[in-house]
Amino acid sequence: MTTTPIPVLTKKDFQTDQEVRWCPGCGDYAILSAVQSIFPELGIPREKFVVISGIGCSSRFPYYMNTYGFHTIHGRAPAVATGIKVMNPELEVWLATGDGDSLAIGGNHTIHMLRRNVGIKVLMFNNRIYGLTKGQFSPTSEFGKKTKSTPYGTADRPFNPLALVIGAEATFVARSVDVFQQHLKDTLKKAAAHQGSAYIEILQNCNIFNDGAWLGLTEKDARSEHVVQLEQGKPLIYGKNRDKGIRMNGLELEVVHLGNGHGLTEKDLLVHDEHNPNPAYAFLLAQMEEMPGFPAPIGVLRSWSRPRYEDVMSKQLQDVIAQRGPGDLSKLLRSGDTWEVK
């Protein structure tokens, strides 16, 4: 028996003939380019990919991916994606969503998809604003932010997406940045290899309605001082001169300085373990940037394994069929209490 080899795919194979209609300079272009670049490297036939979206600027994504896809309704993309993955577990299902679509109207669907561990890869574009509807505050907008819908500053405390999904027991949690292209591609590949729900928060700039949302992290001079890159098995070290790091002090994280008479070396720092079974570790990392003097983490915060929802469902169906035989829909519809309407 011979098998047909998978054709060699390129980035161009995942591009469509649709005009990309994001504002010039939008961070979504960089995310689209990264996804189209890594898909050919996954060794998966193009017809096995499905891209799902809800509503928002990010949700134009399926139009620009030459794969199967659905542009669903506001906040409901996780429900549609779950249905597809459960009924067709062999499909590679990716979900493009934004901070408004997934954390406001879609918040409930998001957390339940993640707690079930459905094998879906979630790309959450976080620009801290409602861009498609032209500049209202979102669930991730900073406290006190002035927008068209909060002219005197929002009174809401923002969601921390990473902390939220860790609390929902997502089995893969990561963060990257639209303009950190190589890091973004590497993170996407790790998410693709994960068996279960994979959630990637992508910090993304909206240059029209929230320009500079992540300037403190993306500016060349700021990156080294305000960002710590999480790498499995390596100490949490950062700084232009790699002279700062993170260590545990009791139950708390602590920023320390290395060398120059401080008496501390890399051996004193916390070594990153994304496979730590205790979610408290990843939760501490997710809280860092909200603490004065701490850097923002990027990379994989958590990656652990437990049964996927679609596999559990499939086994359950097989077990019932083995015990009771194949179902008969016609017989089912005519069984139990029936009545005649006259």
Image (cartoon, rainbow, N blue to C red):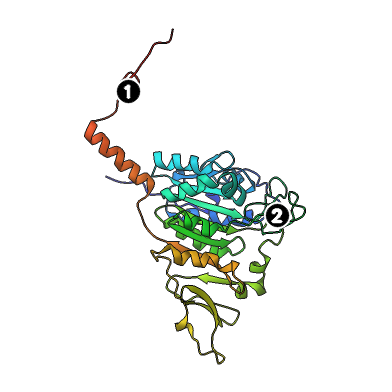
Which numbered disc, 2 or 1, marks the residue that appears first in the sequence?
A: 2
Quick one: quadrant of the N terminus?
Answer: top left
Q: Amino acid at mark 2?
A: Thr
Mark 2: give few (<14), some (14-19) or many (20+) Cα within 10 Å: some
Q: Is residue 171 among what the camera can see? A: yes
Image-quadrant location for residue 171: bottom left
Give the residue type at disc 1: Leu
Give the residue drawn at x 32%, y 46%.
Answer: 3
- Mark 1 neighbour class, 10 Å CA radius: few under 14, some 14 to 19, many 20 or more: few
Estimate the x, y position of residue 168 in percent, counting from the top left. Answer: 47, 53
Does 114 sit above or below residue 215? above
Q: Secondary structure at mark 2?
A: loop
**Near-viewer residue (213 or 59):** 213
- Which residue appears at 72% of the width and 50% of the height? 135
Q: Position of residue 14 (x, y in %)?
A: 53, 48
Against 315, residue 43 (above or below) is below
Secondary structure beneath dot 1 equals helix
Check the picture and name the quadrant holding the C terminus. Answer: top left
Residue 81's x, y, as percent?
Answer: 48, 42
Measured from the top left, where is residue 46 in percent x and y?
Answer: 46, 46
Q: Which residue is mark 1?
A: 332
Instruction: Report the front residue among 157 and 96.
Output: 157
Residue 154's disc is 2
Image-based side of 322 in relation to 295, left or right: left
Name which residue lies at 33% across and 20% down.
Answer: 330
Q: Residue at x 54, y 61 (%)?
A: 175
Q: CA distance from mark 2 to mark 1?
A: 54 Å
